Amino acid sequence: MSLLSRFFYKRPPDGLLEFIDRIYVFDSCFCTEVLPHGMYPVYLNGILTELHEEHAESQFLAINFRDGDKRSQLADILHEYDIPVIDYPRHFEGCPVLPLSLIHHFLRVCEHWLSTGNSQNIVLLHCERGGWPSLAFLLSCFLIFKKLHSAEHRTLDIVHREAPKGFLQLFSALNPMPSQLRYMQYVARRNISPEWPPMERALSLDCLILRAIPNFDSDNGCRPLIRIFGRNLLGKNASMTDMIFSMPKKKSLRHYRQEDCDVIKIDIQCPVQGDVVMECVHLDLDPEKEVMMFRIMFNTAFIRSNVLMLNSDDVDILWGSKDRYPRNFRAEVLFCEIGGISPPRAPTVTLNGDMKGGLPIEAFSAVQELFNDVEWMESGDNAAFWLLKEFSANSLQDKFQKLILSDMKELSKFQAKVGLQMPLMSPLDSDEEKYSAASDSGYSVDYEKVQHGGNSSDSENIDRALTTEDSESIAPPPPPQAPKPPGTVPPPPPSSKISNAPAPPPVLGRGRAATGSAKGRGIGLALQSNPPKKASLKPLHWVKVTRAMQGSLWADAQNQGNQARAPDIDMSELETLFSTAVATNASVKGGTKRGSAISKPEIVHLVDMRRANNCEIMLTKIKMPLPDMISAILALDTSVLDNDQVENLIKFCPTNEEIEMLKNYNGNKEMLGKCEQFFLELMKVPRVESKLRVFAFRIAFSTQADELRTNLTTINDATKEVKESLKLRQIMQTILTLGNALNQGTARGSAVGFRLDSLLKLSDTRARNNKMTLMHYLCKLLAEKLPELLDFDKDLIHLEAASKIQLKLLAEEMQAINKGLEKVEQELAASVNDGAISVGFRKALTSFLDSAEAVVRSLISLYSEVGRNADSLAQYFGEDPARCPFEQVTSILVIFVNMFKKSRDENARTVEAEKKKMEKEKASMSTIKGSE
């Protein structure tokens, strides 16, 4: 206090304590006992009388922190002295920290009141019993707000020193200082932000992760229960605060022990906005016995990277309970955008074969290949749905053939292998199944020859078969075959010719032959016992029309009959020209070879053939034995498998249906295909897909973290360069002087600054001769007066790179890293019960997690710093970060720098041209004078 101020200093009346100039606190706020009812008015009247006598020219404002909603006795007494009273609550949902809006209101009211009335107005602070923690907090906020103190923790300690020792513990069971310090840091940002408080974000509080288990019971563990208080965004009145989330009190509430696990993850999925209080309570075996573990209060406006990481010093805990928390204890509150809450998935709607949601229609393209010859014996929606998928798959046949042909070399090997296997029958098939397959195949061939106009001998044979059957009575169709018992080998896939096109609709001849008497069936069987060999033709990849639209040429052709009949096709010529392979005599007549082929054991395929082929192609690109590949996955060995290979392995993890199919297979597993063998190896590892995803994150983590760190560092460097560039500062001052000179005598003149986007208007302002802009003139002026400023762009080497970075994308990358680490922790916790197979995996994952957590902590710290620097860059130019974000500031500066350089270079070329012109004129003048 200066000598002059001490001379004019007025001692406050008895009963008041002066914390700041003209801010008094009633000393009753420091009493542990309540004054008797009759003594309280006497106490207040004595203070107020003396106060009016000593400050007769002052006006007074009283701020009271009251208990409940009823009118306080203080307000009734002060009303008699014409002193207005503003009441504030003592706490917010049990926490002695007021919402940010009330803090803002308190600061504005106090600042406004003290700045009016010729600086003689006085603020009186009063609290009812239990209100001291909130009063001390708001008083500390005001000291930070007025920049009388800068260190938040020290400021709060200074205020609490005025109260008796242990006074805070008397009124608050938990230490409220961590939450109070967090809000004081919010207030400290008010000094660098023109608009405060910032807009509150609506977020979804995703989950709470506790690392290192606190000790709250005899088993060195805890049974946490979470409650959240805040605005009910889903209610009718979103401005009212209430308990918006609470875990149910159940005896089955999970109990965590330090020896069992070191991570607790509690899913919440609760929308929050504004001020939020989260309580974590330890629930004992008795549901009515609760122990507060910790409390957190925060505001969503200041959640930068959708994560809030806190240690034991950053949460409100019981006094003297610090030893209950391990040294490495950390609470992580993870958020996501409010749109990230997935609504319940609607039932999948099928329309014209397209799946709305769920799997794409391409996933069903293999249905026809596997079940082409199966007759659907059930009626109803299921049969219609199956047929609809079958027809839709045919229309995409060409697309999938192109997809499979992406690797022609590998595909040819599989086609050759499959071609040898398809004609074979399983040794487990019964005679009846062989007969059924042979009869179906035979009639398919005959019918195709009839449709394509085969040779006369074939047609005559078919006519004889039909004529013979006509003489017999038509018997009812045979009953469907009983389903095969589980564990039997499924029938072999159909031939490639049938799979290339759908089965044609049956005609009368085929239908009657298939449903005839025993005699008719015997003739048909004899007819097909030695069918002529038909060459395999190359397919025409067209899009087939299954139903002729009325009025189209296909419908007219059916109606006109023979009038629009197409010419007969010479099948022998067609086979000669368009056959896929020329059959040798040995392959046609070699009965011995066929017999030897039948005797070979068949490779059994349980998985969808198309998926199996794609899986085998993928495995050929990895080129290592399956056990070695599994070992590399469990060791997280990045030198053996790269990210693309791991992603492909994830795509071909067995589904639940495939796992059940392989488990129920009782045959010789050595006869299974490569895909099935691969699935069996993967099934030996618990949660193999989850482990593969962790492996993929492990591979990509270092690159992702390095890129994020590089972008964050670039923003920091660019911000530092702009703010520390003296040349840019001088150029901005020159532009201000230039603009005031042009706007002199107008409403735009006498400016103390200008908006940042005004820099872009320098090139729009042209001289009267339209040969020069104001930017050209600025460069000309600087070249004449301050030439050292012309290369100011060399000070801003990171500006252009920073202008291409979006803070929103950086936040998403930060959230993706946090989510990835969460999955890593989940899998690490789950792998404890895997047994010996995951020992190496846990060791490798633990080592990675330790290093990754340190990286993420540093990234979050760097991101927070970047957020502050990005806001300060806009404030450096007098802009509001909410209206002129970092991306806009950097883009404007980059455009200005480029325009400045362009104008500078154009001026240099103009000066050089004028110089050459003058030299040329001078030379011509010298020539003229010499000639005279």
Image (cartoon, helix red, strand yellow):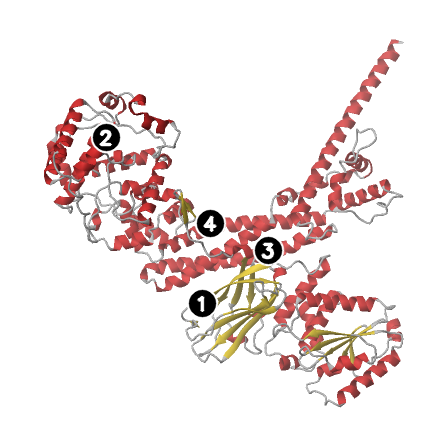
The answer to whether marks 1 and 3 mark residues whose Cβ atoms lie closer than 8 Å is no
Numbered disc 3: secondary structure: helix
Numbered disc 2: secondary structure: helix
Q: Label 1 vs label 3: CA separation?
A: 27 Å
**Three-letter code, disc 2:** Glu
Q: Nearer the viewer, residue 717 or 292?
A: 292
Q: Residues within 10 Å of mark 4 (few under 14, many from 20)?
A: few
**Three-letter code, disc 4:** Ala
Please give left or right for residue 564 compared with residue 888 in the image: left
Q: Which residue is mark 4?
A: 700
Q: Which residue is mark 2?
A: 448
Q: Which residue is mark 1?
A: 262
Label 2 vs label 4, nearer the camera = 2
Location of residue 733 with respect to 211 vertically, above or below:
above
Q: Label 2 vs label 4: CA separation?
A: 55 Å
The spot of residue 213 in percent (x, y) is 47, 70
Q: Label 3 vs label 2: CA separation?
A: 72 Å
Q: Residues within 10 Å of mark 3 (few under 14, many from 20)?
A: some
Q: Indicate which disc, 1 or 4, sits on the residue closer to the N terminus.
A: 1
**Three-letter code, disc 1:** Asp
Label 3 vs label 2, nearer the camera = 2
Numbered disc 1: secondary structure: loop
Q: Residue at x 75, y 51 (%)?
A: 878
